[in-house]
Amino acid sequence: MERDVIIACDFKSKAELMEFLKPFKGLNPYIKIGMEMYYKEGPELVRELKRDGFKIFLDLKLHDIPNTVKAAMAKIGELGVDITNVHAEGGIEMMKAAKEGLNSTEAGKNTKLIAVTILTSINDEILHNELGIKEDLHVNDVVRKYALNAKEAGLDGVVCSALEAPIIKEIGFMSVTPGIRLLGDDVNDQKRVATPALAKENGSTYIVVGRSITKADNPVDAYNRCLKEFR
Ligand code: C5P
């Protein structure tokens, strides 16, 4: 599996996204399109970016009953994106249904399906006080359990923080890790963060970097710094 840096393109409009991508022409980076952009611009934007040669992680984090997720994934499959995802909290049956949905389309057979374990904005305190997880269980334990479920369901990997990447490596699975910050950058709303260098040391397969690149004075430089530290 090729290790790579994925740029989280969280912009308000297609115009802003296209402006941001201009200096990246020729570098053809892996980009992540999330809910905000997808709900505004729809599948046509994804088709256009694929035609332009970008590798795409479509981050829509599906979480519903198996039948609904399967039908939605059949639509996503037609887009031929490189990676897409569901929430592991939907359970094994839902994850299996998601894979079936993707596999029901020709293009979707090549799409990697990964499961979000615990969001990087969640920590032990939230897990216990808000989400009702027993006090003797920690983020690490839940991430491991969800990753094992995703593996059992036949998925390709998980989303977790780089701090949990060693657990994923240990079970022989792929990890896509957001919550990455270059040294000195603002942590913002993330709670479990790591630098690209630490993510590499911990065995992440892909790192997802948003604001450390998109809000940098020189985004191409920041992207290249991430690549250099991570590869
Ligand atoms: O700007 P920043 O680097 O924090 O962006 C991280 C990106 O990764 C966001 O698009 C966010 O939705 C996404 N993400 C995350 N934690 C997860 C899954 C996805 O931060 N567990």
Image (cartoon, rainbow, N blue to C red):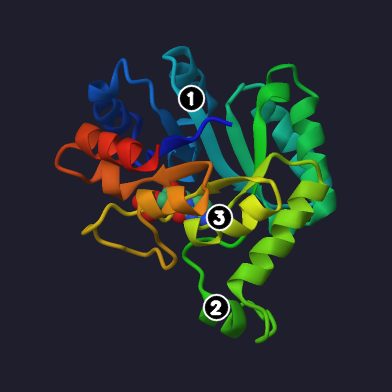
C-alpha span from label 1 to label 2 = 34 Å
Residue 100 in the image: above or below residue 95:
above
Q: Nearer the viewer, residue 4 or 120?
A: 4
Is residue 140 found left or right of 230 in the rendered image? right
C-alpha span from label 1 to label 3 = 22 Å
Amino acid beneath label 3: Ala
The circle drawn on residue 73 is none
Q: Position of residue 230 (x, y in %)?
A: 38, 42
At a point 62% along the width and 51% down the height, the residue shown is: 169
Amino acid beneath label 2: Asp
Classify mark 1 as within 8 Å of ligand 1 or not, answering yes or no: no
- Which image quadrant is residue 225 in? top left
Residue 116 visible in the current orientation? no
At a point 23% along the width and 46% down the height, the residue shown is: 215
Q: Which residue is mark 2?
A: 124
At a point 32% along the width and 31% down the height, the residue shown is: 17
Q: Which residue is mark 1?
A: 55
Residue 16 in the image: above or below residue 172:
above
Q: Position of residue 16 (x, y in %)?
A: 27, 33
Q: Which residue is mark 3?
A: 165
